[in-house]
Amino acid sequence: MQQTTGLILSGGGARAAYQVGVLAAIGRMRREAGVAHGNPYPVISGTSAGAINAAFLASNADRFDEALQDLVCVWRHFQVEQVYRSDVLGMIRSGARWLSLLSLGWLLAQKKLRPKSLLNNDPLSELLAQHIDFQRLPHLLEQGHLRALAITASSYSTGEHVTFYDSCHPVTPWVRNQRLAQHCRLTHDHLLASSAIPFIFPATRLDGPQGVAYFGDGSMRQTAPISPAIHLGASKILVVGAGRMLEPPKKSQEEPTYPSLAHIAGHALSSIFLDSLAVDVERMQRINQTLELIPEEKRHTTHLRPVQLLLIAPSQRLDAIAAKHADALPNTVKSLLRTMGASTSSDAGQGQGFGLGQGNALVSYLLFEGAYTQELMALGESDAQAQQEEIYKFFGWAGK
């Protein structure tokens, strides 16, 4: 029986460049193995920045290899200005105004003065419109180039986690505790909602399962990130993470200092983006191990099935890499981060430029600059190369 391969791309802002490096390395291995062209991931599921990568590939499933090279090019030449406004006027209207109003709390009662987010992501909306054509998706699904695409977001109105999906075959929307699914025609608004990092980017209004609501980043309250691909028919799944699961532990300071706002924000985002995927991977591995202990003739009574899983995640700390390249941020963004408590640190910045000290985790999500994204892609390629034998085995390629 032929298996259906699913691809899970997690969230993480600028950290999602790592995913592109991993996929580029796998694409190269695929060509070296002499495998026929076409889309190797019939089911694609993404969250936050991973949803943007997922949608880009899915909307070009009929030219997957070329699309992957295009995606590499986009991430290789990224600039902050393509994602959020960093000019003086733009920062005044968003970040600086937000921080100023915090010190004048009584003004926040005036609804017209309430800021929506720390940063203005209008440039991201333009970037998505330029590179992702959702009008192609129905045709690609109908022609069999793609089986399903899923994009996740979190409803601020109901507190539920929602997976929006489109598929070539009927799939009954699933309902779990605090998790819902909705079949629909996917749009750029779904991507803006899924990638709306809390506090950083504004929420997006969508028509959800419970009616119209405002949605934010899909990594929030995401307890089972692997689940959508399984519901949509994947029988084996490649998971590309964006940190923490395989990276070396962070060395603790001898004398801890009180965390800054930037440090707390980075810690919170890491919890949102990284923890649930690690837990879900462990859960899936335990289920597979348990099913192996059950005789095959009795497995059908469990309503569970084994799912082959391959995990590729960073072998280095991405916040440490971000600290090396933080000086590439526009001066306006660096000033905003310093206001939030990110300060010059010889430990983080090697004695030069803009060191982030406690704030390097936060910057690892916001550093959409080529020097940083290129190093993340190179790390992704290196980590994938280190797992070449497992990758060949996962895809069933001969030669390794």
Image: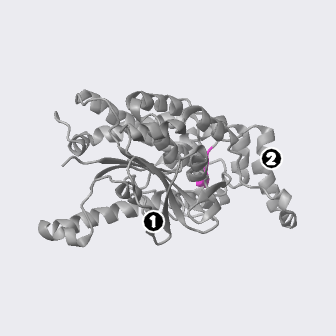
The kind of residue on which mark 2 rests is Arg
The numbered mark at residue 362 is none
The residue nearer to you, when weighing 298 against 29, is 298
Q: Residue at x 28, y 28 (%)?
A: 31
Badge 2 density bin: few <14, some 14–19, many ≥20, Cα 10 Å: some
Q: Above or below — where is 383 with respect to 283?
A: above
Q: What residue is pinned by disc 1?
A: 223
Per the rendering, the mark at residue 93 is: 2
Question: Residue 223, position in %: x, y?
Answer: 45, 65
Residue 343 rendering spot, x and y as whole percentages: 67, 50
Compute the Cα span from label 2 to label 1: 35 Å
Which image quarter holds the C terminus? top left
Color scheme of the displayed model: one colour
Question: What is the quadrant of residue 289 in the picture?
Answer: bottom left
Query: As shown in the figure, which amino acid type bears the numbered disc 1?
Result: Thr
Residue 23 x/y as whole percent: 38, 38
* Residue 18 vs residue 334, the one in the foreground: 18
Q: Is residue 353 visible?
A: no
Residue at 44 percent across and 40 percent down: it is: 58
Answer whether residue 95 is magenta in the image.
no
> Mark 2 vs mark 1: which is more N-terminal?
2
Q: Secondary structure at mark 1?
A: loop
Are there few (<14), some (14-19), or many (20+) residues within 10 Å of tag 1? some
Which image quadrant is residue 225 in? bottom left
Residue 347 placement, left or right of 144: right
In the rendered structure, the answer to whether residue 70 lies left or right of residue 6 reads: right
Q: Is 120 or 338 nearer to us in this picture?
A: 120
